[in-house]
Image (cartoon, rainbow, N blue to C red):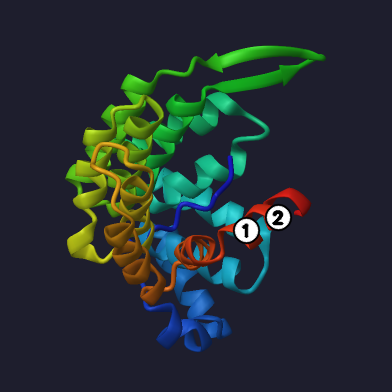
Amino acid sequence: MDPLYNTNEHKPLWNKAEAINTLTAEPTIYQLKKRTKKGDGAAAEMLRQIYVETNQPEKSKKWAKKGAELGVAESMFWHSCYVYEENFETSMYWLVKACDKNHIPSMIKMGDLFRDGVLWEEDNLYIHKMEADICKAICWYKNASDAGSILAKIRIGDAKLRSRNYASALKWYQRTEKSNSPPGIRKIGDLYRKGLGVPKDRGKAREYYGRAKELGNPSAKKALYSMDHPILSFFSSIFH
């Protein structure tokens, strides 16, 4: 499992920018370990984050497991990520437990697994651990969306786009506008540019691309360039 679901949509247990120097001090490490022994799951999760920041993966895995066992959803998610390659069933057990706590990245990850399905290699044989099921995927994305996730709304829009339900895709992307989501706004531009679910309108496409570009979206910048330089973009796509 690719542990890249830090969506910034849930509050961390500590402010990394302000606290990392203090937290990595040995007295602080000692106190956190002492608190963990007394059953403080938040302390275990703080230790996991410290060891991630100080590039000590084995220690971060150890404390993710401890935090998970003490009931911290963030730790459950990361422990699930860490054990995914070695034990799929254990990984799913902890992912489900994190989902039960309405942990946004976990619900999105569950949706991704159902979206793509899981094909597992054992003894040179490929086994379906999870069949792809877009309906279940969307259900998980909706749970995450209801919990406040912008990324989940984009995931639903993407699913609707793949099923050619363009009007529904547009609605889900539009739900990200108030949050100034760069990818959501850029995807609205794509729909206007191609005339999917809306009349083709290069002016509106350019408007949405411009907004997304101002918000730092590199794909929007490329889209604007391709609109302004169609021939150069065509040859660039061939040779790259």
Mark 1 surroundings within 10 Å by alpha-carbon count, few (fewer than 14), some (14 through 19), many (20 or more): few
Position of residue 77 in the picture relative to residue 87 (left or right) = left
Residue found at x 62% / y 58% = 231
* Residue holding disc 2: 235
Q: CA distance from mark 2 to mark 1?
A: 6 Å
- Residue matched to label 1: 231
Foreground residue among 41 and 123: 123
Q: Residue 8 lies in what quarter of the image?
A: bottom left
Q: Quadrant of the C terminus?
A: bottom right
Q: Are marks 2 and 1 in contact (CB under 8 Å)?
A: yes
Dot 1 amino acid type: Ile
Where does residue 141 sit, x and y in percent of width and height? 30, 37
What residue lies at 36% left-to-right and 34% top-to-bottom?
Answer: 161
Q: Secondary structure at mark 2?
A: helix
The image quadrant of residue 93 is top left
Residue 157: x %, y % from top left: 31, 39
